[in-house]
Amino acid sequence: MLDVRTKNNNMTKLAEYREGLKTKPQLRNLFLELTLRCNERCLHCGSSCGDVSSDELTVPQYEKFLKEVKEDFGTDNKMLCITGGEPLLRKDFFDIMGIANQLGFRWGMTSNATLIDDEVANDLKKVGMGTISVSLDGLPETHDAFRRTPKGWERAMKGIESLIKVGTFKSVQVTTVVTHQNIGQLWELYKILRDMDIDSWRIINMDPIGRAKLHPELLLTKEDYVYMIEFIRTMRIAGEPVTYGCSHYVGLEYEREVRDWYFLCTAGTYIASIMANGDITACLDIERRPEFIQGNILKDRFSEVWNNKFQIFRKNLCDENEKCSSCKEKDFCHGGSYHTWDFDKHEPQVCFKDILF
Amino acid sequence: MKKNKKTAATAAMFATALNMALGSVTPDTVPTLSVKADEPDYEPSAEYVEEVYGPPEFFTTTATEDAYDPATETETTMAVVYGPPSMMTTEYDPYGNENPAVYGPPSFFAQGDINWDGSTDVFDLIRLRQEYSDSQTNDKYYGYTEYDVNSDGRLSIADLVALNRFLLGRSTNLDWYYDGDEEPMPQPEYGAPEYLDEDEIVTTTMMPDNTSEETTTATYPVYGPPIAFD
């Protein structure tokens, strides 16, 4: 719908920019996985979280780490992204984030919001939370079944209301993971969210990662993908703050139209992550294999790992696959998202060629 | 959900693109979702945009509707937005209606000033788009309301096109609509006029004294993903 020539020019510039990032990465987002424990057991969880044992860092360990990051990188243009599991399950959550706030870090989090009430929302405000993304994965019954949490929807909505009541957060976002089961509920979900004072609605497709691999019946069909992308674009044409997620190249027709940016997987170039046990990797959605663990903050200084390792993430995945390397979109796609690349078969698990372009 | 400068800029960007595609669009063509999924996975009646022709079937009036022909030039207008409509004859005033409505909001709005903020600008277009989207699944009647920009008795894509052309300075008359006889606007080779870059939004605002004010803003990054959660 928008001018393809302009998009083509912009994506060509972006491809050149990405080449530069591979040799001169810029840390912008640091994901902290505070815990793998969760009070929900979502069918699609990329980290297979739930009622599991979780080696967790202590408050002093986080304090030391964050001070080192501030010393080596500063806090300007850096954002901590707090995730889990359910981060609020940690009793020392506010101790950790209070330290981050005092050090001057901006931060946001993902949460199921089931543990958020007015008091917690005010405490989040006190420790400087800027943004939050809350999961709603369909209409109430579907959401509860998908996340295997009775009254999960009701509790999440109360949590969102508490956040909105505080009113000072930069962004309160709802995230919906679309599956073959709930895709027919998008319009009804829109009617509910439209009347709420949230800042945006992020719609992402379920990817075959983590626990989702056990539920192939929930993966989207080709028609589902087209429907979902068209739905998002229709919403954006109407001026609604709806966006597709950061994953996957969607082709020149839809790039820049379903989100405010062009596709660029920044795992290892903009983004680094600290797992619950201190292991250093790029993106927490990437399969947890030994070769992706670049170090551990308990024995390595993060800046040295960031500067001297991470080569495995700073390359073009498409070069590893014959079909990808001969694709005319490879400079824009560069193999797609890291977290959906099959590192055994050296091929993308999600590719929208012949679906969206 | 909150609207902000970013969503307004996005919608304006699409508005420009829709105008660029005008040559192949008629008032009866509406954007539709390209996929209609089969039952039982989808509910098509709620999931895609359908074409709208005239007022909904349930609409009734005690007025002499049968005698009313929207195709002819007439001074008879519907002045009420909500509640039982009343037919009244009045001189057409593009900047307002001297006869206040019996029910619903007053009709003291300038043509094209959808959100009643005193100016006709891109935010009206955004509001109009949203209402048009809503109109596909609601039972409201829009004829000769503020949404019926070109005063043809209904809310359709022609209203979006008319307002968009007006804002871009390509027409000075909001009563314009494409009736199939008008020669399609010539299109540049690649769609985008050279003066309008994807990264700029040109907004034309009509002032109460009939002058117009044009502002150009660069609103969004060319490339590079945003900060997480923004």
Image (tube, grey):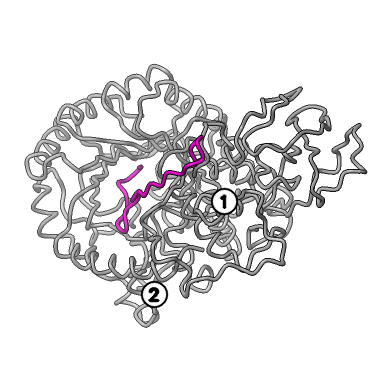
Residue at image mark 2: A329
| Residue B219 is a magenta residue | yes
Specify start and end residues of the magenta stretch as a single range.
B206-230
Do dots 1 and 2 share one subunit?
Answer: no
Which x, y percent locates residue B26?
68, 62
Secondary structure found at label 1: loop
Q: Quadrant of residue B86?
A: top right
Mark 1 packing: few (<14 Cα in 10 Å), some, or many (20+)? few
Residue at image mark 1: B172
Left or right: A77 with respect to B2?
Answer: left
Which x, y percent locates residue A242?
49, 46
User: Which label is found at residue B145?
Assistant: none
Q: Quadrant of residue B21?
A: bottom right
Given residues A352 and B161, the one toward you in this image is: B161
Identify which amino acid the numbered label 2 is placed on: Glu
Q: Quadrant of residue B179?
A: bottom right
Residue at x 65% of width, y 58% of height: B32
Identify which amino acid the numbered label 1 is placed on: Thr
Left or right: A19 with respect to B207?
Answer: left
Mark 2 packing: few (<14 Cα in 10 Å), some, or many (20+)? some
